[in-house]
């Protein structure tokens, strides 16, 4: 009798083990989180909806501190998180969330930007970590779009607005990345920084990086590099100081004002894309020709001096 019971128990255990390994497991992004929601195959094509559902259940979605629009997706095959005209606000207690985008163990994360994207956060907008036995993690911002991060932080903030892992790599290759924080560091390995670490920030591919942080705009990093033909546009005298592990002024003080690192021929966006150059236009009576200051002109366009004008609502450069 006992032998029969033991055989039945053994058979049941074997069946459970077989079932465990035979059952398809739901693919997950190695602990990649978006707004505290784990990214899986079931939600990766519409992370905005997953975000909304989660915080609706919590009871805070739709208010001043939590809202989202646009499109956010994740591609498992290419490790790519795509932000497509996304506007996300998650101003929670800085100590309650590791990051709006928290990559705890994925070796590589590519952030593809389409259109104009905004993240308003109370904690890190992006937080990079690493598997215990994994290589140095990398995070690359790429695409033809822009991303603006407004991080309000607070005295309980543990992370930079973009928090790079102690041995992590961050590459800026998108059109424009702008990071402002009211309290802490804008970009750096603020959490777990080590002077002998390998944290690296690299800027290239015609990207523009704009950063401002009350405790340091670009700080707590071991290495910094920018492409040939790049320079610090502001502030005057800005430079990378390896002794301070930060972008500093000429006296070696960590800069807390806005730092702009971009190609030498870079200039701020005017907000008007794709201007028309030297195209003869006949202004309509309703629209007409205006200066950039909004002053309407009565002189024919062909007789105007060189400059930039608004003709029928379009920006025109006359050379």
Image (cartoon, rainbow, N blue to C red):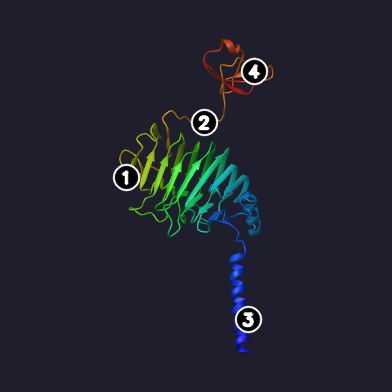
Q: Which mark is residue 288?
A: 4
Quadrant in which the N terminus is drawn = bottom right
Left or right of residue 20: residue 215: left
Q: Earlier in the sequence, mark 4 or mark 2?
A: 2
Tell me if residue 232 comes above or below residue 22 in the rendering: above
Q: Secondary structure at mark 3?
A: helix
Crowdedness near tag 3: few (<14), some (14–19) or many (≥20) residues, C-alpha within 10 Å: few
Q: Which mark is residue 162?
A: none
Q: Nearer the viewer, mark 3 or mark 1?
A: 3
Task: Estimate the x, y position of residue 140 in percent, counting from the top left.
Answer: 48, 44
The residue at which mark 2 appears reads as 269
- Nearer to me, 287 or 38: 38
Q: Give the quarter of the image for residue 28.
A: bottom right
Q: Secondary structure at mark 4?
A: loop
Tell me if residue 234 comes above or below residue 286 in the rendering: below
Task: Estimate the x, y position of residue 45 in percent, counting from the top left.
Answer: 63, 49
Left or right of residue 247: residue 56: right
Q: Nearer the viewer, mark 4 or mark 2?
A: 2
Q: Secondary structure at mark 2?
A: loop
Q: Earlier in the sequence, mark 2 or mark 3?
A: 3
Q: Write the residue at 62% across / 61% down.
A: 24
The residue at which mark 3 appears reads as 8
The residue at which mark 1 appears reads as 242
- Nearer to me, 243 or 303: 243
Crowdedness near tag 1: few (<14), some (14–19) or many (≥20) residues, C-alpha within 10 Å: few
The residues bearing labels 2 and 1 have C-alpha atoms spaced at a distance of 31 Å
């Amino acid at each position: 009798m006992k032998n029969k019971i033991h055989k039945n128990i053994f058979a049941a255990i074997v069946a459970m083990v077989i079932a465990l390994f035979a059952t398809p497991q739901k693919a997950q992004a190695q602990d990649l989180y978006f707004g505290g929601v784990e990214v899986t195959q079931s939600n990766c094509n519409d992370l905005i909806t997953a975000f909304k559902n989660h915080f609706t259940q919590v009871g805070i979605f739709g208010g001043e501190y939590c809202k989202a629009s646009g499109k956010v997706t994740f591609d498992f095959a290419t490790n790519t998180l795509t932000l497509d005209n996304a506007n996300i606000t998650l101003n929670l207690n800085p100590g309650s969330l590791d990051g709006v985008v928290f990559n705890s163990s994925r070796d590589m994360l590519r952030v593809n930007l389409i259109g104009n994207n905004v993240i308003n956060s109370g904690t890190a907008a992006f937080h990079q970590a690493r598997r215990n036995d994994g290589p140095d993690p990398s995070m690359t911002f790429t695409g033809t779009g822009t991303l603006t991060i407004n991080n309000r932080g607070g005295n309980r903030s543990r992370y930079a607005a973009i928090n790079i892992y102690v041995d992590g790599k961050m590459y800026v290759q998108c059109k424009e990345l702008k990071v402002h924080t009211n309290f802490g560091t804008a970009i750096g390995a603020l959490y777990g920084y080590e002077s002998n670490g390998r944290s690296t920030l690299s800027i290239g591919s015609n990207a523009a990086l704009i950063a401002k942080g009350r405790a340091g705009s670009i700080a707590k990093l071991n290495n910094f590099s920018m492409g040939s033909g790049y320079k610090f546009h502001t502030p005057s005298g800005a430079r990378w100081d390896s002794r301070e592990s930060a972008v500093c002024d000429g006296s070696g003080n960590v800069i807390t004002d806005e730092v702009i690192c971009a190609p030498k021929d870079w200039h701020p966006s005017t907000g008007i894309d794709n201007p028309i150059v030297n195209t003869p236009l006949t202004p309509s009576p309703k629209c007409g020709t205006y200066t950039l200051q909004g002053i309407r002109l009565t002189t024919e366009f062909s007789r105007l001096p060189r400059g930039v004008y608004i003709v029928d609502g379009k920006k025109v450069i006359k050379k």
